[in-house]
Image (cartoon, helix red, strand yellow):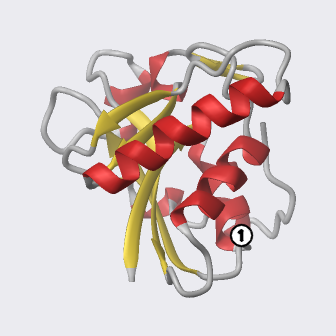
């Protein structure tokens, strides 16, 4: 198993979408990219920690590649809006790729360049590419939130 960490707005919908990708074995929502230890949802929403709502994905690279996950990331959110997804606004909703090694960093940068050059989006991708930091799991009620509510369509 390998790990990928992405931020793409409200983590509920991102988790639901990635949980349906063949080769994704486990998803966990949480917070990363900030300045405090063990942040809570209230602290992250208070915009004082610098964390993003994010998803940690464990995947089987024999079934889905990291490049394949990046392609899904572009499908699952609008990477051209700075610090917002739909009605959700703030740095905690930023678009970000938190790479765990240099191969992921290189793949992320290449995917952004290729996607920008393709003309797929009217505006340039603003997704940040940053080294992974500590991933703090969100409170249990956030894990598989939409699934627990019987909702099969991602928000955002």
Q: Which of 121 and 13 lies nearest the eye of the viewer? A: 121
Q: Quadrant of the C terminus?
A: top right
Question: Which quarter of the figure has residue 2?
Answer: bottom left
Residue density around tag 1, few if under 14, some if 14–19, many if 20 or more, within 10 Å: some
Q: Which of 94 and 131 lies nearest the eye of the viewer? A: 131
In the rendered image, the vertical position of residue 2 relative to residue 98, given as above or below: below
Q: Quadrant of the N terminus?
A: bottom left
Q: Which of 108 and 74 lies nearest the eye of the viewer? A: 108
Residue behind mark 1: 147
In the rendered image, the vertical position of residue 45 relative to residue 4, given as above or below: above
In this view, which residue lies farthest toward the left? Answer: 37
Percent of width and height locating residue 102: 27, 50
In the rendered image, the vertical position of residue 42 relative to residue 65, given as above or below: above
Percent of width and height locating residue 97: 45, 40
Percent of width and height locating residue 114: 67, 35
| Total numbered labels | 1
In the rendered image, the vertical position of residue 75 relative to residue 125, given as above or below: below
- Helix, strand or loop status at disc 1: helix
Which residue shows up at 39% across the image and 53% down it? 104
């Amino acid at each position: 198993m390998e790990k990928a960490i992405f931020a793409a707005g409200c983590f509920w919908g991102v988790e639901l979408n990635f949980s349906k990708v063949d080769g994704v074995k486990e998803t966990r929502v949480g917070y990363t990219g900030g300045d405090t230890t063990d942040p809570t949802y209230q602290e992250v929403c208070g915009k004082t920690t610098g964390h993003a709502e994010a998803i940690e994905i464990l995947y089987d690279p024999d079934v889905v590649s990291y490049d394949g996950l990046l392609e899904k990331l572009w499908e699952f959110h609008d990477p051209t809006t700075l610090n917002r997804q739909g009605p959700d606004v703030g740095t905690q909703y930023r678009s970000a790729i938190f790479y765990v090694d240099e191969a992921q960093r290189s793949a992320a940068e290449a995917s952004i360049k290729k996607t920008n050059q393709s003309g797929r989006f009217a505006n340039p991708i603003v997704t940040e590419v940053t080294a992974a930091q500590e991933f703090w799991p969100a409170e249990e009620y956030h894990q598989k939130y939409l699934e627990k509510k019987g909702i099969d369509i991602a928000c955002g």
